[in-house]
Amino acid sequence: MPAFTAEPWTARDIPSQQGKVAVVTGANTGLGRETARELARAGATVELACRDHAKGTEAMADIHAEVPGADLRVQELDLSSLDSVRTAAADLSERYDRIDLLINNAGVMYVNPRRETADGFELQMGTNHLGHFALTGLLLDRVLAAPAGRVVSVSSVAHKIRSRIDFDDLQFTRRYDRVAAYGRSKLANLLFTYRLDRRLRDAGAPAIATAAHPGVAATELVRNLPGPLRLGATLASRLQNSAAVGALGTLRAATDPAAAGGDYFGPAGPGEAVGLPVWVASTGRSHDPEAQDRLWAASEELTGVTFEV
């Protein structure tokens, strides 16, 4: 366990990001917009990678109003379509020789009934994991071109809940359960992070992979909670992190000079539900090297994307 687990960490602790390029998926709302805002405030050039270009433009205007002079651009990106992922990666690679921070934030939650991506993947696994897997692989040369690039994946405490990777039914075609499917996709985020970081270390690359989760945060994802959970979240709204506080774990994983590859950050409060970000532990299942390797191989096969390292 790292030595910096207990001290408070806020947006004021973000070091200068001047000269850095950051790509934030799902940056038009919630955690993504707060992450983009604070990185821009710290001086980074920020790409708001959003499924809806118009909403991305609105978010850009919102951030500009608060951070005059912010260096922002909007990149259309639909993670539920590999064609869109490839187009976005090509656009970003054309604009930038390097990407210092790739923040895989976007996601869908508790989708019901079962739906599929444009490529036939179960929507939560396809968007939350496979889309980001493909995007990262296609942009990895740009991340490796940075002096100290970071790939940050946003997971969830839900990775601990009914979240087992069934490699015989990765797309949940049998007995679909939206809660379990979401937990599986968030476990996949961590399996990917730890395997990617291991590959980067083995290759002697300058980049690292880290992860974070927001705890229970007041974002638009709450609208997809099953009825009893949604009611509970509404009644317990005072026990939720704001989107701004929820995004701090991502920001710490992306910018804290003390963070190391494979570190995972989440709220310090009870149950990791609320509070400022500290180093937290994920499940033993997320650290299973066999599961990491099997998911990696399956992800390469499904997306057709292979990595340089």
Image (tube, grey):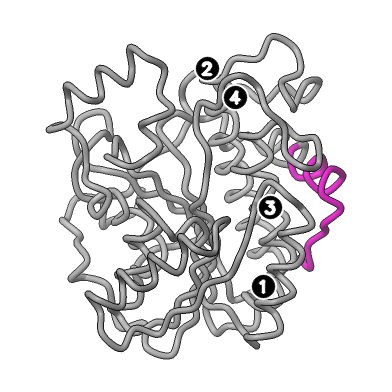
Question: Within 10 angstroms of label 1, few (less than 14), some, or many (20 or more) residues?
Answer: few
Name the secondary structure under disc 4.
helix
For label 4, count other residues whose C-alpha is less than 10 Å away and answer few (under 14), some (14-19) or many (20+).
Answer: many
**Tag 3 residue:** 133
Q: On the rendered structure, is 78 left or right of 248? A: right
Q: What predominant SS class does the magenta segment belong to?
A: helix
Kind of residue at badge 1? Gly
Q: Residues within 10 Å of mark 2 (few under 14, many from 20)?
A: some
| Distance (Cα) linking label 1 and label 2 | 35 Å
> Which structural element holds mark 2?
loop
- Counting residues from the start of the chain, the first of labels 2 and 3 encountered is 3
Tag 4 residue: 181
The image position of residue 170, as x and y in percent, is 75, 27
Identify the residue position indicated by label 1 in the image.
204
Residue at position x 64%, y 83% from top? 145
**Quadrant position of residue 19:** bottom left
Cα distance between the residues tagged 2 and 4? 9 Å
Looking at the image, tell me whether mark 1 or mark 3 is earlier in sequence order: 3
User: For this view, does 12 lie left or right of residue 93?
Assistant: left
> In the displayed structure, would residue 196 be above or below residue 208?
above
Is 116 situated left or right of 100 in this image? right
Q: Amino acid at mark 2?
A: Arg
Under mark 3, the amino acid is Phe
Q: Between marks 4 and 3, how big is the CA–CA gap?
A: 17 Å
